[in-house]
Amino acid sequence: MSNPVFVLLHGAWHTARSWDKLVSELTIYGSSPPTPDWSADVELIHRIVSELVEEGRDVVIVMHSFSGMTGGTALDKLDKPLRMAKILSGGVVRLVYIVAFLVLEGLQHSPRGTRDNMVGIITFLPEDVKEMLYQDMDDQTVAELAKDLQPQSFAAFWSTTTHATWRHIPTTYVLCLKNKPNTMMAAQYLVDSTKASGPHKIDNLIKVNAGHSPFISRPEWTANMLIDEAKRSV
């Protein structure tokens, strides 16, 4: 069996460049203007992963922060057990949530029109970036990372999940201990409440002494963790 493919889904405000350090480690081993909702993101994730599994590839989905909502919704009918039952090769073999939204079906992050009745996009104030996203990095690194943050559409927070992929696919949750205390408590609550909600395949909780973005602050650790989780799944 060939090695699985990692699909990396970045969170709000970030771009694909946020994964650069992690991608470098993995290779060692071999929105603006505003959008009306997240449907385009969900469709893109589903299409990309569908193409990979149709090629017979095993896929590990890695989600950070807000992308747990889009990723968790986008993977309906792409899990490997379901495809095997249809005598099809390939499929999603594991989900890895890195302090990501692990939520139930039908969850809306914020009711439409909330956030002080504002519309359009949200941007970060420079002085808030370290506290919110990069708690365990030095100020110079944070300043450079902040340059790459992009505006985030308000409307993404108004969309509603339609699928809970973690009920069907083995799932790992990474809890970052240097994150904001309220964010860390919220993440633990998500894990506990989803487990209590009914059938699930959340089989591993990993705690790491890192801030909100360990794939940047600790890329080697993150790469090794992902490879270990992939090995358990194929």
Image (cartoon, rainbow, N blue to C red):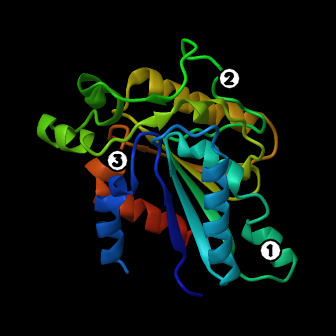
Residue 152 in the image: above or below residue 230 = above
Closer to the eye: label 2 or 3:
2
Q: Which of marks 2 and 3 is nearer the N terminus?
A: 2
- Decide: few, some or many residues near mark 3? Use Cα within 10 Å; few <14, some 14-19, many ≥20: many
Residue 60 in the image: above or below residue 90 = above
- Quadrant for the C terminus in the image: bottom right
Q: Nearer the viewer, residue 12 or 153?
A: 153
User: In the image, which disc is placed on residue 214?
Assistant: 3
User: In the image, which disc is placed on residue 112?
Assistant: 2
Q: Looking at the image, which residue is at 62% across and 62% down?
A: 94
Amino acid residing under circle 2: Arg
Q: Looking at the image, which residue is at 67% across and 62% down?
A: 46
Mark-to-mark CA distance, 3 and 1: 32 Å
- Decide: few, some or many residues near mark 2? Use Cα within 10 Å; few <14, some 14-19, many ≥20: some
Q: Label 3's element? A: helix
Q: Label 1's element? A: helix
Q: Looking at the image, which residue is at 30% across and 51% down?
A: 216
Amino acid residing under circle 1: Arg
The residue that disc 1 covers is: 83
Mark-to-mark CA distance, 2 and 3: 32 Å
Q: Earlier in the sequence, mark 2 or mark 1?
A: 1
Report if residue 35 is visible in the image: yes
Mark-to-mark CA distance, 2 and 1: 36 Å
75 on left or right of 101 = right
Return the x and y of residue 30 as percentages of the image width and height. 38, 81
Label 2–label 3 contact, CB within 8 A: no
